[in-house]
Image (cartoon, coloured by chain):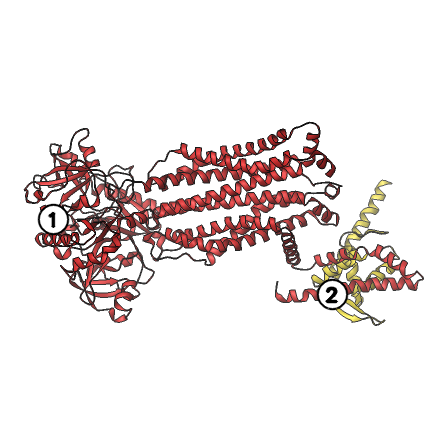
Amino acid sequence: MNWRHWLRRNDREANLERELSFHIEERVADMVRSGVSEEEARRQVRLEFGAAEQVKDECRDVRPARWAETFVQDVRYAWRNLRCNPGFTAVAIATLALGIGGLTAMFSAFDTILIRPLPYAKPDRLVMVWDGQSKTDDRTKSFPAPAEWYEWRRLNTVFTDIASTQPTDATLSGDAEPEQVPARKTTGNFCSVLGVKPLIGRAFNDQEDRDGARVAVISYGLWQRRYGGSPDVLGRKIDVNDTPYEVIGVMPREFYFLPARDIDLWMPASFPDEMRKNFGWHDEEVVARLKAGVTRGQADRSMAALSLQMTAKDFSGPHPTIVTSLREDLAGKTQTALVVLLAASAALLLIACVNLANLLMSRGLSRGREVAVRVALGAGRGRLAAQFLTESLVLSGLGAFAGLALALPAMRFLASLVPETMGPVRLTLDWRVLAFSAAAAIAAALAFGVAPALRGSRTGPQDGLREGGRGAAGARSYWFQHSLIVMETALAVALLTSAGLLLETFRHLRNTDLGVRREKLLTFETPLFRYGDFGRRDAFLSAILEKIRAIPGVINAGATSRLPLAPNETAATFYWISGQPRERIRDQVAIIRLVTRDYLPTIGARLREGRFFEVADRQSDAQVAIVNESFANRNFPGRSAIGAQFKFGRTGNKGYWYRIVGVVKEIHEVGMEEVARPVVYSLHEQGSDQLMIPPGGIAVRTAVEPAAIVSAVRQAIWSIDKNQPIWRVQTLDDIFARQLTTPTQSTALMGAFALLALLLASVGLYGVLSYAVTQRTGEIGVRMALGATSRDILLTFGRRGLALTLAGLAIGLTLSAVASRFLNALLYSFRPDLIPTITGVSLILLGVAALACLAPARRASRVDPVVALRSE
Amino acid sequence: MASSKSDLPQGTLDLLILKTVALGPVHGYAIAQRLQQISRDVVQVPGGSLYPALHRLETRKLLAAEWRQTASGRDAKFYRLTRSGRARLETETANWKRLSETVGLILGMAEGGAQ
């Protein structure tokens, strides 16, 4: 089809007209010549030639691309038709816009996070390798040790290569203000495994990694920010933790990798020799590229076998590995949330379609006469069905446009669902999303258009043209419409229940007892690498904490090796309680936190028994420790933990005995997860354990708004050391809110979908009942004339509405039971009680349904028999 | 739709039109007239069948059309045979002859067999 065709179209119509009228005129002229009067001749010619319009139409039918002309005609007709029914059209478009808009927005998030290729070469061949647990059915992932990476790389048979990275702190100084940046140490093959190349310069290699070369690759962001984006940054010496490193490359802007988008610096890991044999220090993230033809499943089994063999003689028992796809690790929990929400939005669109099918069906029945006239004028059934379907397409096209307008703001909201690990991505309306939206619109048009089109086109001319005829409103069409209502009610119930469960979980998460008081608690981090010596570190910490406490509005301050709600945990250690058999040690792991004396009171920890650390502990030779409830309950069930002694690690007869002086209520050290883990708090001031992470996380309890004292805190620290970097300044409330982003968003979205579904379902119920009342006015009139009271009539319609609702509710609750299984992953291992949610949903649904039934049922009960029968 | 004194078998109308047009450029009315005259009124083609058939043949490029003046000075759409139209006419004519001979043969035989 080209434009010339359209230009020629009018021309062609005129010629057709001319050709036929020439024929008729010639024939008339011939007959007149043979002596017939002109009037009579014309009459006869009309009879023998047939209906001119029909002949024209048959001539048009043989043209190529005739369907396109028909389609355009149908679209025009549909448009006129829709404009004549603005109420119906507005409801239909709004319904579709909600459905298509919701699905489009969800798809854009889904596409961005789960479908679009990651910024690596052949990203689907990349996997992460984690340590498994000694119990093989437990798929909890933990960080491997450098020694494991080393052995895996040497012995594996399934990967082309394996790289490893570990977190590190980096303070940039020398060339400008000191700046703390997130950094990673990586093995020399990191870039080659991922298949990425620096934007400028080069990456470091295995040789440099082995030799401990002082070279670094920086991020695009850091390059722009600190070095003005100048290419002469290559070869430049920068001070990283007071050591000069040479910048040899800048990564591309879109590059990111676990664990977060904001890594600014990559340096060679250069594991010292003892690390290659030490299986105890677990802080690696290992990424590998599958060999051609090897599946993730095969790699998982092969690596698990290798690891079990490697760790057979390990003192904590052999453990397997877990091989996961890289994308899965990047998307994390968001993946499940997205799948669930995408399914919910699809369900919403389905409800919208069901609703529209019902509306169109009712409308099709009341359009019986129009259809009958067209059938009488010679329209075929296919032609009619095509016309009806075109109307649906026009509707859903308009709905899709309106939906896109709704999707845009929704996408802004959804952008916060993108997990931190995915890097700075924005959701955009690109061609993929538009194509998806168009496909959704067409699918929707078919879903809601086909049944009414087939049904509507079935009308025979005599049905509709009968005086007072109302088309084919037989029992079958009620049956069909009723099952549609039941279906949409069921879907709405499933969505409502899911939303209810999420809401329960969300409320539960919000009310989680973190074991600390989150209000007015300022936190920040300050790296202590320049205070490696205990004496200096202790003096520095005491000095800054003293200064901070002196700031007006500050109540107390303390330091810890990691602040609460940490995103993940690497510092877990084996322990052994005095009096236990030695082999118990391999089952006992605790998280350790090195804290200053005032830290626990500062964050608002609560004692279950015993005491907090005291000034006197500092001078004491005996090491003291405070443990959490899990530790106490696990090791001292039913008795007091106070006074008990334990040791860390595999120190054998060496190492200090720690004496437990206090037990605190559970503090959420790691994320929002449900599982409680044993935690040990040991006192930094006692200077005992150099292996632990130094307490660079500072918590400040304030009486005023925490934001008001931030600059005073900075000044306090800089007055002691003007080169000391301070970063990640945030309140515990901020950290908490960020942890809840995904649940907040999922709950809000699910809630919105569920409410819309409820609205649509009740509109549908209302529509069907209203329609039934209108259709049956005559029948109602007869029944009332025969003595039925208006109460009887009210009950008839009320019962029908109730029956439909109850059927929908029953099916919906069954669906919910299935859906809640998929939801589990979103519920943070929290098992909400189903009963209150189900009760609530049932009550809400019945209430709304009662309202939707009431109006039409009352209208039916008020039918005046005289009026009704007269209208018949 | 094609009715009157004799119904034409399926596809025959196209063949008759092609044959009529083969004699020289001619407009639709003249085709109808000629068919009627030559067949001595046995074949009457109503406009409702003729024009769709003409347009179909034109679409298939078996006929070409142009607007010309008639002897009486009126504008009319004249059809003429294209090269592929002529080829089609030849094959169709041959087919028709073979078919009608065969049908005749069978009918003659059947009569003989009944006796």
Q: Are marks 2 and 1 in contact (CB under 8 Å)?
A: no
Q: Residues within 10 Å of mark 1 (few under 14, many from 20)?
A: few
Question: Which chain contains the residue that carries disc 2?
Answer: A
A718 left or right, relative to B10: left
Is any atom of residue A315 visible in this view?
Answer: no
> Is the residue A157 above or below the residue A236 in the image?
above
Q: Nearer the viewer, residue A139 or A231?
A: A231
Name the residue rendered at 54%, 50% in the picture: A94
- Disc 1 designates what residue? A690
SS label for mark 2: helix
Question: Picture coordinates of residue A93 (x, y %)?
Answer: 56, 51
B4 left or right, relative to A578: right
Write down which chain is painted red: A
Question: Picture coordinates of residue A784 (x, y %)?
Answer: 68, 30
Q: Residues within 10 Å of mark 2 (few under 14, many from 20)?
A: few
Chain B: what color? yellow
> Is the residue B75 above or below the residue A828 in the image?
below
- Disc 2 designates what residue? A14
- The amino acid pointed to by label 1 is Gln
Q: Quadrant of the C terminus of chain A?
A: top right
